[in-house]
Image (cartoon, grey):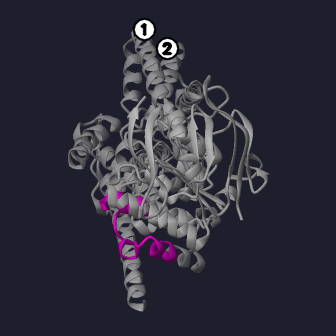
Amino acid sequence: MSSILTKKLTVAYEENLVVDELDLALPHGKITAIIGPNGCGKSTVLKAVGRILQPRNGTVYLDGKDICSLSTQEVARKMAILPQSPQAPAGLTVGELVAYGRFPYQRGFGKLKPDDKKIITWALAMTKLTDAEFKDVATLSGGQRQRVWIAMALAQQTDLILLDEPTTYLDLAYQLDVLELLYNLNRKQGSTIVMVLHDLNLAARFADYMVAVCGGHIIRHGTPEEVMTAEVLRETFHIEAKIVPEPRTGRPTCISYDLI
Amino acid sequence: MTGRHQANEAQKRKVALRNLAIVTSCVALLILLFIVSMNTGYIKLSPLDTLRILFGGGDDRENLILFDFRLPRIVLAILIGAGLAMSGCIIQGISQNALADPGLLGINAGAGLTVILYVLFCGANSFLSIFTLPFLALAGAGAAACIIYVLASQKGQAAAPLSLILTGVAVQAGISALTTVLAVKLDDSQFEFVAAWQAGSIWGSNWQFVLALLPWLLLLIPYVLMKARVLDILNLGDDIACSLGVAVRREQRGLLAAAVALAAACVAVSGGISFVGLVAPHLARRLAGPRHSILLPVCALAGAVLVSAADTLARASVQPTGIPTGIMVAIIGAPYFLYLLAKSK
């Protein structure tokens, strides 16, 4: 039962304020997509929520507690964060990388216990990687490699998974594949998923809740129908967009747009 | 299900066996080198002679050669190789930079500067040099590393590995320039002494030096081995490491301090041997893969093999003075490193 709340969150690199007094509530048990133009601070928000970046001001609350008051290990048992295109060291196998997800639960020399092994097997099965367990991560395709990182996050057994552009550099089929996987995790395991996405239509199709960010401020948050409007996109991306409901899913879809 | 389970177990046994084979062959190679090295030098001792002397059957002259000259030097070469290699492995692991080595943290440069200052003010043949020089070199190495760390830290934040390396390159260049300026002021005998030190001649080869180096290694190596898992995670990048619950900056600081102390203690005794920390981790990674629980021990063994092989060759090649070991390490190591680079493309 994890939930995230930010109060007046301010993050800055040197003197540049990237996120300015942001109040954000991420709904529990839902898929949230953060959208916004390049350099608008969406990755920064994700990293600050995931305590990778120290906020200049304000607080992130995880289950009602200030995230800075919790030990990093405690947080790691509640929340997993996947940065954009992570790199695995050469020669590491899929099974070994997924096993690293058990790190927050291990002590001493960290021999894997039967429980850990069961969870690793489960994480591999969920991501359809059972047959790839002994393959070198470096030899896999981009889409499979993204699955391995998600499997590692699954092995971490957290209620919350934060992902920064999990579909970048993937072709159309693999983008869908990764998002379907996350969707199933949310619906079957009840995981809360928060991701930064570039593709507006995919965001509207898979997210229950959307947050449009521009210049470190929230332009609009709410259901896809509330956020995917011509007005919000004009303010966020400075584009004139044509939005229609997608015939199959009924979700709002941007079928064409122009620069203003 | 049981079929898969059996296949998994078989795979794991295979990996365990392979690791055992790697460690065993490294140890065997080291023992072989140890034996060859005992027989190598200006005065030849056959293996049988060596055995006889080891078991107390030698005359005074033979005892002196083996116990007071050769053995301490061989043991030192092994310890220095292991220490420098592990130090390099740690630095490459936390910076995720395969080209990082202890030299980048100013260790060689800092130690070199204090040595030249000492020689300049106290003379090369001062009675005390054999005892004070390692401590001075250690202090110099530590000071240089601290300066780099402070300069690389930004406004109260701990230094990130990348800025550490970049700052290291700059500071190292500065210290080297200063060293060169000072070298001009040396007379011939002083210059010869400093040059020999910088070339890494393992000059202080007696048992006191072994005893001075050993506590450092006995203290630091277990700490580093205990942190093998943390190194594995840090090797995935700062963000993932944070997500997995590693206190990134704190662990990096502790491991960096251990790496600096290891390398500084070695360089203080050996002089400027620099290539081991770069090459040995590469070699070990090819043999043992990226997991530090096996990588670190294999790396230490690879470093020990490299330095003792270089030292043996150095003593065998030019008589009676020998080539400095540091130069021999570079002669063996550089072509191998180029080969690795060519192969990885």
Viewer-closest of B30 and A150: A150
Q: Chain of mark 1?
A: B
- Residue at horizontal 44 percent and vertical 34 percent from the top: A239
Q: Which residues are magenta?
A: A121-147
Viewer-closest of B269 and B49: B269
Q: Are marks 2 and 1 in contact (CB under 8 Å)?
A: yes
Query: According to the image, label 2 marks what residue?
Result: B120
* Left or right of A209, for residue B105: left
- Residue at horizontal 46 percent and vertical 60 percent from the top: A149
In the figure, A169 relative to B109: above or below?
Answer: below
Viewer-closest of A187 and A54: A187
Q: Chain of mark 2?
A: B
Using a 10 Å C-alpha cutoff, classify the residue at mark 2 as few (fewer than 14 neighbours), some (14 to 19) or many (20 or more).
Answer: some
Residue B317, position in %: x, y?
22, 41
Residue B4, position in %: x, y?
39, 85
Viewer-closest of B271 and B102: B102
Residue B281, position in %: x, y?
39, 50
* Left or right of A69, for residue A121: left
Residues at marks 2 and 1, CA–CA distance in whole angstroms: 8 Å
Where is residue B15, by image quadrant? bottom left
Mark 1 residue type: Lys
Where is residue B176, by image quadrant? top left
Query: According to the image, label 1 marks what residue?
Result: B185
Asked if the stretch drawn in magenta spans residue A142, the answer is yes
